[in-house]
Amino acid sequence: MGEKIKKHYKNGITSLLLAAVIILTTAAHAAAYEVIPSGNTVGIRIETDGVLVVELGEVETESGKKAPAVDAGVKVGDIITAIGSESISSGNDFKEVVSKLTGDTVKMQVQREDKQVVLNIKPAKNLDGNYELGLWLRDGMAGIGTLTFYDPQTGIFGALGHPVSDIDTGTMIPVRDGCIFSSIVTGVVRGQSGKPGQLQGSFDMNSVKGKLCLNTEQGLFGTADDALASGRLMETASLDEVELGEATILSNISGDKVEEYKIRIVKKNPNDECRNMTIEVTDPRLIEQTGGIVQGMSGSPIIQNGKLIGAVTHVLVNDPLCGYGIGIEQMLEQAVENANNLAA
């Protein structure tokens, strides 16, 4: 087939690090909940619901180059959900539908941000006699991130504290199917001003530990078995209870070992839906090993006064010691609102 499906994962090795750079774009009574804070890195695989347009291209035809997608008004970041009367859920669906196309104009339905748009597109015959639409597409991605909490009563987990977005287009990935896996951190690229660091890791795609169901502004959510989380139940606290000053985070920056590191809550941002806290790393051990907050640490639980208060989400690019966190109440609200779907 002529259309190109870009994959950003392969078995065992991460090819995308989920998080920690600041480009991101109340609530439940958090104190009513007890969950297990984690801090473990996990492998994350997402298969998109539809196919994501990451690049527009041209088709070589006998009469010269043609650009059907461009002519039809397709945009990078569009998610193709149907062609003609056929629904598109995956790259395989797309290939099968396109293989049946002729030169006749067909309707294409795309999700563009929060709108459904219908376009008319005329396929072009390439030099091999096959019809193409002039698109580069993606239908899956994977990487590592950090598990924030696990609820042993429901089996629901929350991770990252922010959405997974496509690396090329910035589009938030709609989840058709997904899994999480146990992972190992194999190395760290230290962060420095102007250049965020990153955790390097690997995971085995044959060892599924949980099902990923939702990708939201407040993070990833799904269900997992209890082997993925260890530790004791901890009460959660609302943003109102958070105090400026000392706190700690739980992070996995080597192997599969989770350790506790000191940070400081510098500021509360109650009017920001997803970046409720400004934080600063103060632990000399973490600073020495990572330079501060690095990509892959997003989702690291924030603990204060014996309660889970939030999760690390972003690093400030020009100052890796500082970043943002989301209040745990925001993540719990998503989990509670979608409990039936997550547990289905």
Image (tube, rainbow, N blue to C red):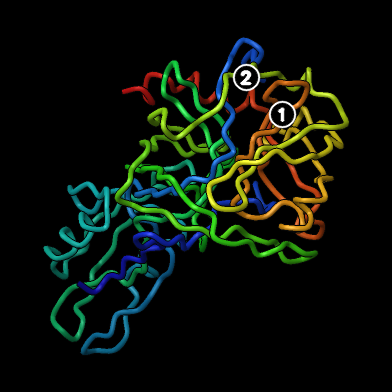
Of residues 78 and 197, the one drawn nearer to the viewer in this rendering? 197
Left or right: residue 328 compared with residue 286: left
Of residues 195 and 95, the one drawn nearer to the viewer in this rendering? 195
Of residues 111 and 173, the one drawn nearer to the viewer in this rendering? 173
Q: Residue at x 80, y 40 (%)?
A: 263
Calculate the distance from the C-alpha at mark 1 to the C-alpha at mark 2.
10 Å
Q: Is residue 86 visible?
A: yes
Which residue lies under the disc numbered 1?
Answer: 303
Q: Quadrant of residue 73?
A: bottom left
Placement of the C terminus among the 4 image quadrants: top left
Of residues 334 and 183, the one drawn nearer to the viewer in this rendering? 183
Question: How crowded is the residue under tag 1: few (<14 C-alpha within 10 Å), some, or many (20+)?
Answer: many
Residue 94 to residue 153: above or below: below
Assign a secondary structure to mark 1. Answer: strand
Placement of the N terminus among the 4 image quadrants: bottom left
Q: Residue at x 41, y 70 (%)?
A: 56
Residue 246 location (% of width, % of height) = 85, 32
Residue 113 is labelled as: none
- Tell me if label 1 and label 2 are in contact, CB under 8 Å: yes
Residue 329 location (% of width, % of height) = 64, 22
Q: Amino acid at mark 2?
A: Met
Which residue lies under the disc numbered 2?
Answer: 234
Residue 168 location (% of width, % of height) = 51, 63
Residue 72 location (% of width, % of height) = 35, 64
Q: Quadrant of residue 312?
A: top right
* Lower sequence index among marks 1 and 2: 2
Q: Residue at x 63, y 60 (%)?
A: 198
Assign a secondary structure to mark 2. Answer: strand
Q: Residue at x 20, y 54 (%)?
A: 93
Residue 1 to residue 119: above or below: below
Residue 16 to residue 36: above or below: below
Left or right: residue 146 compared with residue 124: right
